[in-house]
Amino acid sequence: MKHAEGTSAVVDALRLGLEPERVYRFTSQLTLHPETLTIRSGASQEAPLLICLHPPRLTEFQFAQRMRELMELDVHLAFPRGLHAHEVDLGGACSVGYAWCHYTGDNPSFRQSLSMASVHLEGIVNRLLEDLQVDRRSIYLLGSEGSSLFATIYAVAHSETFAGTVSLGGNLLPEVLADFLPEKRRIPFLCIHTRRGRHRITERDRKHVDDLRSMGFPVDFETLGSDGPPWENEAALIMSWLSQKAGIPLVQSD
């Protein structure tokens, strides 16, 4: 496979401490910024795929650096640009993600932004499935902070594709997710918050988890302390959860 932008891909690999053949960038002809940083699994067989949507304060490369522990897994990692924030107009709102928590599903700007971002991500997913040896039973979507809401909406609405979704902080808004539920499928969630810091837990977060469970979603809910370098504990939890879930069929609601 050729690098879409060979020089930047090699630089990314060196800065991430990986072999150059494991890292590449590709472009898709879509609205929004099209570039995606992809790190291929070292496994020779079909591997799980984890698509990571980063928060607005980080670039896709910076997020890859923070989640570098995930590279120890035999999992393909993809970090798309353009879905994190401020790329989609919300009719005066400042960003996708953070601002979405102030909107309902009836808001026209919300619907338009969701549609644009969904088209963008659909193209990325299709390209990844064409280019990588992916275990189709083990495709996961991760959203951090401002990207959590979109990640969970998209994964729930496309539960035929995704085996689960991971949320690092952010607002999940079960009342909005309810508008996108398939008839029976309920994919598992991993929701991670901390007692202090950027992913700080609130009572609203606890209620959202309870609401998701009442809707039939299997939810693993983890609250971390502040020990250890930032992101280290989050990455370890994600690694453990993916290892447990890989290859498990989707849960069917009653």
Image: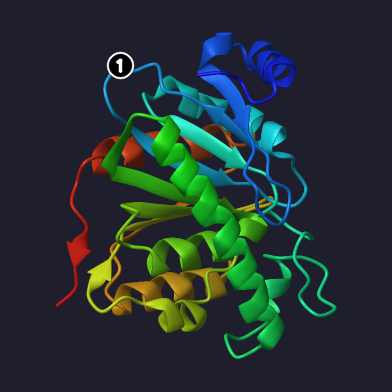
Q: Residue at x 66, y 77 (%)?
A: 112
Does residue 239 appear left or right of residue 71 in this picture? left
Q: Residue at x 54, y 44 (%)?
A: 52
Q: Residue 215 location in percent, x, y? A: 31, 79
Q: Residue at x 53, y 46 (%)?
A: 124
Query: What kind of element bears circle 1?
Result: loop
Q: Residue 118 location in percent, x, y? A: 55, 63
Q: Residue 152 location in percent, x, y? A: 48, 63
Q: What type is the residue that disc 1 sits on? A: Ser
Say which residue label 1 marks.
44
Which corner quadrant holds the C terminus?
bottom left
Q: Is residue 198 above or below residue 156?
A: above
Give the farthest residue toward the bottom.
106
Q: Residue 76 location in percent, x, y? A: 43, 30
The picture quadrant where one finds residue 34 is top right
Q: Residue at x 32, y 72 (%)?
A: 213
